[in-house]
Image (cartoon, grey):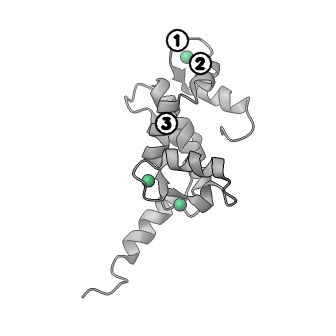
């Protein structure tokens, strides 16, 4: 049998990648799936969720555990958590969080607000301006 430490270096390497919260510019590029330098509605959704996800995933393992979601889970919050935990493994992956946000349309308003020239896309400049105008979770 292999030593239990065999996989440790890989785990550490992956962990350190994910621990560093992506800066806004990197996050923009990561969310820009089509690579055209602007974010569609779905891409903006993923962009916002990735930012919040990075903040909440304190141990940087790529999942949000219940304790990271909210240490004092009230019944309503447990329901919210379970809605996102699509595969029911007790933790929320980034993909699960993004899928839930797309479905619920919670960023529709934020998207409209960020798309100041109303062309249906959020440019890098619009994203920067939007974040500069906000305090709170949507950073
Ligand atoms: Ca985590
Ligand atoms: Ca899950
Ligand atoms: Ca725009």
Q: Is residue 76 left or right of residue 135?
A: left
Residue 23 in picture, x, y percent from top left: 57, 45
Return the mark for residue 97: none
Q: Quadrant of ligand 3?
A: top right
Closer to the camera in the image, 40 or 102? 102
Task: Using the numbered discs, state the Cα–Cα distance from disc 2 to disc 3 in whole angstroms.
Answer: 15 Å
Query: Which residue in the protein does label 3 denote?
Result: 46
User: Is disc 2 in contact with disc 1, using a CB cutoff of under 8 Å?
Assistant: yes
Indicate whether 25 appears above or below 54: above
Query: Which residue in the protein does label 2 denote?
Result: 115
Residue 20 in picture, x, y percent from top left: 55, 57
Q: Residue at x 65, y 20 (%)?
A: 113
Mark 2 Cα-neighbour bin, 10 Å: few <14, some 14–19, many ≥20: many
The answer to whether the beta carbon of the residue marked 1 is less than 8 Å from any atom of ligand 3 is yes
Q: Quadrant of the C terminus?
A: top right
Return the mark for residue 119: 1
User: Is disc 2 in contact with disc 3, using a CB cutoff of under 8 Å?
Assistant: no
The answer to whether the beta carbon of the residue marked 2 is less than 8 Å from any atom of ligand 3 is yes
Task: Using the numbered discs, state the Cα–Cα distance from disc 2 to disc 1 in whole angstroms.
Answer: 7 Å
Closer to the camera in the image, 112 or 123? 112
Q: Residue at x 50, y 19 (%)?
A: 121
Mark 1 Cα-neighbour bin, 10 Å: few <14, some 14–19, many ≥20: few
Labels 1 and 3: the sequence-earlier one: 3
- Under circle 3, the secondary element is helix
Q: Quadrant of the N terminus?
A: bottom left
Closer to the camera in the image, 99 or 28? 99
2 vs 3, front mark: 3
Indicate whether 120 appears above or below 76: above
Task: Using the numbered discs, state the Cα–Cα distance from disc 1 to disc 3 in whole angstroms.
Answer: 19 Å
Labels 2 and 3: the sequence-earlier one: 3
- Under circle 1, the secondary element is loop
């Amino acid at each position: 049998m292999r030593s239990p430490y065999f996989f440790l270096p890989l785990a550490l390497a992956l962990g350190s990648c994910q621990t560093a919260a992506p800066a806004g510019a990197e996050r923009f590029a990561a969310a820009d799936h089509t690579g055209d330098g602007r974010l569609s509605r779905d891409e903006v959704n993923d962009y916002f969720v990735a930012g919040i996800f990075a903040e909440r995933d304190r141990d940087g393992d790529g999942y949000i555990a219940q304790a990271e979601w909210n240490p004092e889970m009230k019944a309503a919050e447990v329901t919210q958590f379970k809605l996102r935990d699509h595969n029911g493994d007790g933790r929320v992956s980034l993909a699960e969080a993004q899928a839930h946000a797309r479905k619920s349309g919670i960023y529709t308003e934020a998207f409209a607000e960020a798309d100041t020239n109303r062309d249906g896309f959020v440019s890098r400049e619009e994203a920067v301006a939007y974040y500069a105008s906000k305090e709170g979770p949507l950073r």
